[in-house]
Amino acid sequence: MPPRNEPAEPRRPAPRLYLVTPQDPAGLTDRLAAALGAADIAAVLLRLPDTDDRHRINHAKAIAPTVQSKGAALLLDGCAELAARAGADGAHLRGVDTFRAALATLKPDRIAGCSGLASRHDAMVAAEAGADYVMFGEPDAAGRRPSLEAIAERVAWWAELFEVPCVGFAASLEEVEPLAAAGADFVAMDCVFADAAGTAASVADAAQRLARVETAA
């Protein structure tokens, strides 16, 4: 217990889930509805199909009511310039330079998140520039990512020193608890959309894992 004349250090809010969709739009609305009905979801990162801007905007507009009606934020993967036209709440950018270039488009009305942070310095630069969150552990274009231990270490470092929220990207359900325990404010995952148990069951499983971490804290 802290001394009576010193207030207790405030705890960070309980970690929440952040879903990352597959790029294939087929059946996505139904799967998202099932996921959002299975647990508390803070945000959904929409990976857009490789089509023209009009089709991308229409896809995001079709998805937005399903996500936003549940109180979750809809973020576009890249394409910050389409966020307002698509009715999205913001965008997620990879790399500090790309993030900085998108800020004028997104701020002050929309969320701007950043990943692809190769160093601690990059993460601090993104936060100082105005990132609403930083993400650690997201695979690169070739599917490569640091080890879970390295990602958890980076999350723990950030959570201890900075107020800007951090997202830990979990490649599997087994990574949810280590990242949450390290101090991630949000745990991102796309694996739930490919789980043989079904999206809703997988999301419910992830939520139970987060709850175990919060109970143990």
Image (cartoon, grey):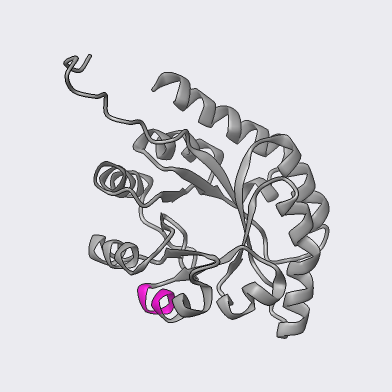
Query: Image point 46% across, 79% down: which residue?
Result: 104
Q: Is residue 124 visible?
A: yes
| Magenta region, main secondary structure | helix
Up-down: is 78 above or below 191? below
Indicate the position of residue 84 as horizontal and vertical percent values. Answer: 65, 74
How many marks overall? 0
Q: Which quadrant would the C terminus be assigned to in this image?
A: top left
Q: Is residue 183 left or right of residue 70?
A: left
Query: Image point 68% across, 44% down: which residue?
Result: 195
The span shown in magenta is 96-100
Indicate the position of residue 189 as horizontal and vertical percent values. Answer: 56, 49
Up-down: is 75 above or below 30? below
Front position in the image: 63 or 120: 63
Is residue 125 covered in magenta? no
Q: Which quadrant would the N terminus be assigned to in this image?
A: top left
Query: Image point 40% across, 67% down: which residue?
Result: 116
Residue 50 occupies which quadrant of the picture? Answer: bottom right
Q: Please, which residue is most extreme toward the bottom here?
A: 52
Q: Is residue 46 left or right of residue 105?
A: right
Q: Is residue 194 visible?
A: no
Indicate the position of residue 208 as horizontal and vertical percent values. Answer: 59, 27
Indicate the position of residue 19 as horizontal and vertical percent values. Answer: 61, 50
Is residue 99 covered in magenta? yes
Up-down: is 152 above or below 91? above
Front position in the image: 96 or 191: 96
